[in-house]
Image: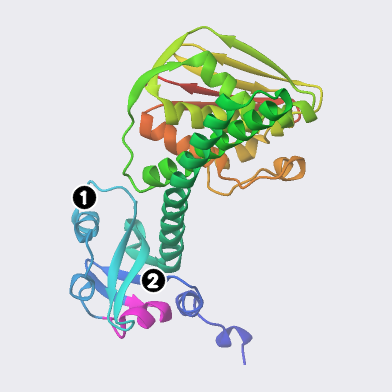
Amino acid sequence: MNPTENKLSHAELATKLLDHVQEAVFVLTGSKITYANKRAKEFFGECEGLDLFELFILEKGTLIVDAIHSDNFGNTLEFEDRVFSSKKGGWVYFHITYVKELSTLILRDITQERILQEAKDNMSVLIAHELKNPLGVLLSTVSEMIEDEDDEESLKKLLTIERQALRLKRIVEQVEYITRAQLGLYTPKPVPINVRRLVDTVLDDVKELVQTKSIKIEKHIDVEKLVADEFIIRTILKNLVSNAVKYSFENSKVIIKITEDYISIRDFGVGIPEEEIPKIFNRFYRTSTGVKMASGSGLGLAVVKHLANIANYRIEVKSQHMIGTEFIVYLHSE
């Protein structure tokens, strides 16, 4: 017997392989389902031969209709939506991809990711809300104690407590604002910002690390005031300065330059490998050299990018591996 006679055809092999992937895959002719893999049937039952739009109940169905029937549509459509699953007996959140060239629809279940993110958002709001009132009482009490204190040593301790309480207050505000921004509930509120005071506040937050690594901070501030959202500017500045200090070599320097048109933060540290630069704004992403250099959550630059998008700012990254990095935030869209 010819051994090739026992081999599967390419189509049969592809079909068997698709039954082992985690995504639900539908092959279409127009809007008619001509093939559904095992995962698709787990969500929607036996559906081959049915019309896609008789099977699917989803909010953004017109996107798929347009993609299937429009001659001017590009090759790929991607979006997220919830779809009613008859087999699961409820709504399921999917990341949906339609590849026009292959007449193929791919659904990846992101329900657990959505639930986890909603839980994180709710927890962030709860934490921020529960901490705001006690912090307000603490700051008010400490302020009164500072006014009444005559002993120099006790006064120093109270001022330290006040400074750290104010720092905690700013962190709580950031958690609250970032959560609102992620939920699309934050609208920038432009106000006049004292730039030098803001820079000093940010540097005070990273003072211990600056001293530990013997980093020299160079400030080139060419503007006294900026009209912008203070939370957005402060958060962007703090994250970029904090990263610059963390990933700088000891006894090096960090240069902060602010004009009415842009903010530039430059360090002389480990830099970013060129192939990793496109990924640095992804949530939880940390560069291979960054992981070895300092601890971190991988959220800082994701937050910077998110807030820059809200404010309509543009970010440019210049980096050389093991030489240093410069982040430039352009404050006016071109």
Depth check: give the residue in front, 21 or 303. Answer: 303
Residue 203 pos. (x, y %): 63, 24
Quick check: can you spot residue 144?
A: yes
Closer to us: 29 or 196? 196
Q: Quadrant of residue 306?
A: top left
- Amino acid type, callout 2: Val
Image quadrant in which the C terminus is located: top left
Q: Residue at 76% of width from left, 30% of height from top? A: 322
Percent coordinates x, y for residue 30 in the rendering: 22, 66
Q: Please tell me which of labels 1 and 2 falls first in the chain.
A: 2
Percent of width and height locating residue 69: 19, 57
What's the CA distance linking mark 1 and mark 2? 23 Å
Image position of 129 (left or right of 201): left
Residue 267 placed where, x, y %? 68, 23
Between tags 1 and 2, which lies in front? 2
Name the residue that disc number 1 marks: 71
Which residue is label 2 attached to?
A: 25
* Image point (54%, 14%), residue name: 196
